[in-house]
Amino acid sequence: MSESSLPESALADPELSGAQAPITAPSPERLRADAASRALALLAAEACDDRKAVDIRLIRVDEVSSLTDWFVICSGLTDVQVRAIARSVEDSLELEAGRQPLRREGQSEGRWVLLDYGELIVHVLTPQERSYYDLESFWGHGEQERYISPLQPGGGDLPASPAQSA
């Protein structure tokens, strides 16, 4: 079918005409929303780190899912630690961002606690649950990054102490 035999409406639709749709820059509002959701994810990751969570991961899924913008996934070594990490996230996000979870699941069992903040979902799991469900692989097509505590050697931009710089 030649271009001249296509209806006018098809010529106006880039997908039907074979033309590439123009790529536009995100709006300033979208950039601010992206930065705000990332900041919320980092705040949650810091709260996880405060309770010694293991292997903290941030996964950006807004490009691949309408479910949420970010996942924060981490492990607690016991059910008591899992609940403590989840409580730390709740307290920190309420204090620092004025946010409370829209939903929370798994608090009583303590093997997998899920905190849903809309644009952020926090998963705190025991190592056994995390290995079994393997959320990182399931959401592997999202952009992933490991959270590194600013208090770890080489983590963050903390100035060197005088003893370290000598």
Image: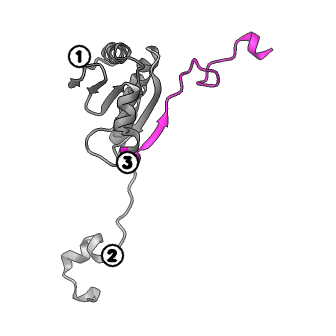
Dot placed on the residue nearer the N-terminal end, 2 or 3:
2
**On the picture, is 164 further left or further right than 56?**
right
Residue 78 visible, this orientation: yes
Task: Decide: is 97 above or below 135.
Answer: above
Which amino acid lies under the numbered mark 1 shown in the image of this protein? Ser
For the residue pair 19 and 114, the one nearer the viewer reads as 114
Q: In this view, does 154 lie to the left or right of 112?
A: right
Report the span colored magenta.
Answer: 138-166
Q: Please name the residue shown 38% across and 17% down the image.
A: 78
Q: Is residue 107 above or below residue 128?
A: above
**In which quarter of the view is residue 97 placed?**
top left
Residue identifier under label 1: 108
Quadrant of the frame with the N terminus: bottom left
Q: What element carries label 3?
A: loop
Proximity of marks 1 and 2: CB atoms separated by less than 8 Å = no
Give whichever of 55, 15 is nearer the camera: 55
Q: Distance between the residues labelled 1 and 3?
A: 41 Å
Q: Which mark is residue 18?
A: 2
Q: Is residue 45 above or below residue 26?
A: above
Q: Would you identify the image quadrant in which residue 143 lies?
A: top left
Q: Is residue 139 visible?
A: no
Q: Quadrant of residue 81?
A: top left
Element carrying mark 2:
loop
Looking at the image, which residue is at 62% across and 19% down?
A: 158
Q: Mark 3 points at which residue?
A: 26
The image shows residue 34 at horizontal and vertical percentages of: 37, 37
What is the magenta segment's predominant secondary structure?
A: loop
Q: Can residue 139 be found in the magenta stretch?
A: yes
- Determine whether, in the image, residue 61 is placed left or right of residue 151: left
How are the colours assigned in the image?
Answer: one colour
Instruction: Point out the tag, 1 or 2, that comes first from the N-terminus.
Output: 2
Q: Earlier in the sequence, mark 1 or mark 3?
A: 3
